[in-house]
Amino acid sequence: MGLSNSIIRQNYIIPADDFSLAGEASSSVKKMLNQLGVPPKTVKRVSIAMYEAEINAVIHAGGGTADVAIDKEKVLITINDEGPGIPDVELAMKEGFSTAPDSVREMGFGAGMGLPNIKRYADKLDIKTEVGKGTRVQITVLL
Amino acid sequence: MKIDQLADLIQAKILTDNKSLDNEISGAYICDLLSWVMSHANKGDVWITVHTHLNIVAVALLVEVACILVPEGIQVEEATIKKANEEGIAILSSNKTAYQIAVEISKFIPLVK
Ligand SMILES: Nc1ncnc2c1ncn2[C@@H]1O[C@H](COP(=O)(O)OP(=O)(O)OP(=O)(O)O)[C@@H](O)[C@H]1O
Ligand SMILES: [Mg+2]
């Protein structure tokens, strides 16, 4: 792989309520990993997990930021938002649990599968959240 | 099966340009819940969905489906077709229902997954 000992860092803004742009950050990371020669299966896991977190920030939290750090061992993605927070993370992690409004359900979001997908595709998922303050979703995929 | 063969088979219109027709089709997947698709659809599937907004392109690329197929003559937004052309994924439109399409595809791709 074309990765030396250095760390590659990228920052993205996840715009609020703009579904047409939702996914730009994960798509850019996907292209970067492909260029670095990361195995396709790993690229797919990273990009699906990141896309789900990115879309969650758009739908549930009015946008946020994404920070990506890639080193020899792992891809570390941190999605931060200043949205409403998640009152019960254990419940939110359950397949099928969703508070998505009808307007986004009509677009096919709101299956309540995003967080379970992230858990499945990531090697590690860490959620820090405070009601009224925001949420930090940290995804690690080992290389 | 190739995408243009599929188009012939079900009399579908290919809405995107012809740069994205190389993918080999190895199955089909029908679902309109995007996260569900990202969890269960397979690489190489024809993804049949009634959604036509931009995000279907992102989902299709993430799951690496062979192409997107919009059934029942539903109109696909111009912006979605443009994005699909940029990203190199084909979108097809058919007047048939998802069920009719699946029946046709199953004659060529056996259900062995
Ligand atoms: N960043 C966030 N801020 C606030 N709440 C969130 C956030 N991410 C997730 N949630 C809460 O957790 C629930 C479950 O999230 P999950 O991604 O699994 O499903 P969903 O987004 O509702 O639907 P899907 O991802 O299947 O389209 C959400 O409905 C929402 O209540
Ligand atoms: Mg979600």
Image (cartoon, rainbow, N blue to C red):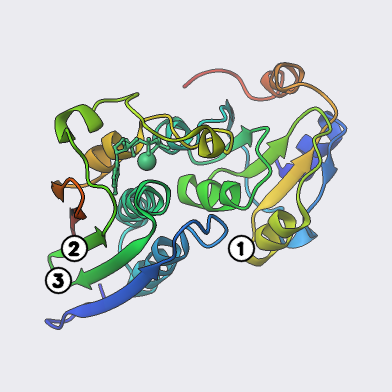
Report the mark closest to the observer, 3 or 1: 1
Question: CA–CA distance between discs 3 and 2?
Answer: 11 Å
Badge 3 marks a residue whose secondary structure is loop
Report the mark closest to the observer, 2 or 1: 2
Task: Name the foreground residue: B6 vs B84.
Answer: B84
Q: Can residue B20 be seen in this view?
A: no
Q: Mark 2 points at which residue?
A: A76
The answer to the question of whether label 3 and label 1 lie on touching residues, with beta carbons closer than 8 A, is no
Look at label 2 and name its amino acid.
Leu
Report the mark closest to the observer, 3 or 2: 2
Q: Name the residue under label 1.
A: B87
Q: Mark 3 points at which residue?
A: A72
Residue A114 x, y percent position in the rendering: 34, 38
Badge 2 marks a residue whose secondary structure is strand
Q: Residue, x 84% and y 33% (percent of image)?
A: B73
Q: Residue, x 21% and y 63% (percent of image)?
A: A75
Quadrant, the N terminus of chain B = top right
Badge 1 marks a residue whose secondary structure is helix
Image quadrant assignment for residue B94: top right
Q: Can residue A14 be seen in this view?
A: yes
Residue B100 x, y percent position in the rendering: 76, 17
User: How many residues crowd mark 1 within 10 Å: few (<14), some (14–19), many (20+)?
Assistant: few
Q: In this view, does B79 lie above or below B90?
A: below
Question: CA–CA distance between discs 2 and 1?
Answer: 25 Å
Look at label 1 and name its amino acid.
Glu
Label 3 within 8 A of ligand 1 by Cβ: no
